[in-house]
Amino acid sequence: MSKKPNLHTYSWREGSHISADAHVIGRALEGLAIRQRRPLHGLTADDVVQEAMDEASPLHGLFEWDNEKAAHDYRCSQARSILNGLRVTVISNGEPRTVVGYVNVRPRDDQPPMYIKSTFAARHEKLRAQMLNDARIGLNGWMKRYRELQGLDEVVALIGTAIERIDQEIEAAKLEEVAA
């Protein structure tokens, strides 16, 4: 009795800026994983970069090969990691509370996104609405990643409730903005 092949398709996660055909990339990574002959067909980031060096690889065009530009881009990525990783402890109602240090928001429609202190952004309607929307996107992503895991049904339901509450907050902020 022959085993049926596992047929599946690939897609990019919501919000991804990668324009290559996800199915082509996914199949290329599957092939690479098989060639690596590791347990569970595991891959490392270095495996992928090494494979992408081949100009014939479908992965090649996903990387920046100008070393000077790649170095700058990498440093910008490091800067984002620093800004995203920083936490600040504030005193709220006499109690210390640790919060995100900086958030990435767009202060005005004619400006690019930038990192602003979260404590400042949370006090300003438009920036707070962006923070709420980012929270909503993050929670939705978490639900999509983990909803299939057994035993998390209650957690997924709670997150669904939290998303509904965030939606209500965003709607209320929009109504206040229109009324103002």
Image (tube, helix red, strand yellow):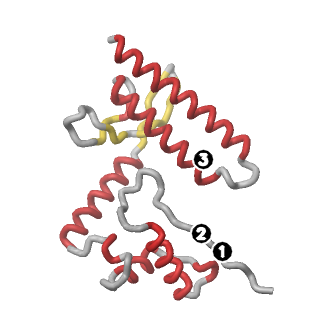
Q: Disc 3 or 2, which lies upstream in sequence?
A: 2
Mark with earlier residue (3, 1): 1
Asked if the residue under mark 2 is in contact with the one under mark 3, i.e. CB atoms within 8 Å, the reply is no
**Residue bearing mark 2:** 8
Other-residue count near label 2 (Cα within 10 Å), few / some / many at <14 / 14–19 / ≥20: few
Residue 70: percent from left, percent from top: 25, 68
User: The disc labelled 1 sits on which kind of residue?
Assistant: Asn
Q: For residue 71, which quarter of the picture?
A: bottom left
Density class for disc 1 (Cα within 10 Å; few <14, some 14-19, many ≥20) is few
Residue 85, placed above or below residue 57: above
Tell me how far mark 3 sits from mark 2, CA to CA: 21 Å
Q: Residue at x 51, y 83 (%)?
A: 31
Question: Which type of secondary structure does the marked residue at label 2 adopt?
Answer: loop
* Quarter that holds the N terminus: bottom right
Q: Secondary structure at mark 1?
A: loop
Query: Are discs 2 and 1 less than 8 Å apart at CB?
Result: yes
CA distance separating discs 2 and 1: 6 Å
Amino acid identity at mark 2: His
Query: Of the numbered discs in the image, which one, if any, rests on residue 165?
Result: none
Instruction: Please provide percent x and percent y for residue 83.
Output: 34, 47
Q: Which residue is mark 3?
A: 143
Residue 107 falls left or right of residue 1: left
Asked where in the image residue 116 lies, by quadrant, the reply is top left
The residue that mark 1 highlights is: 6
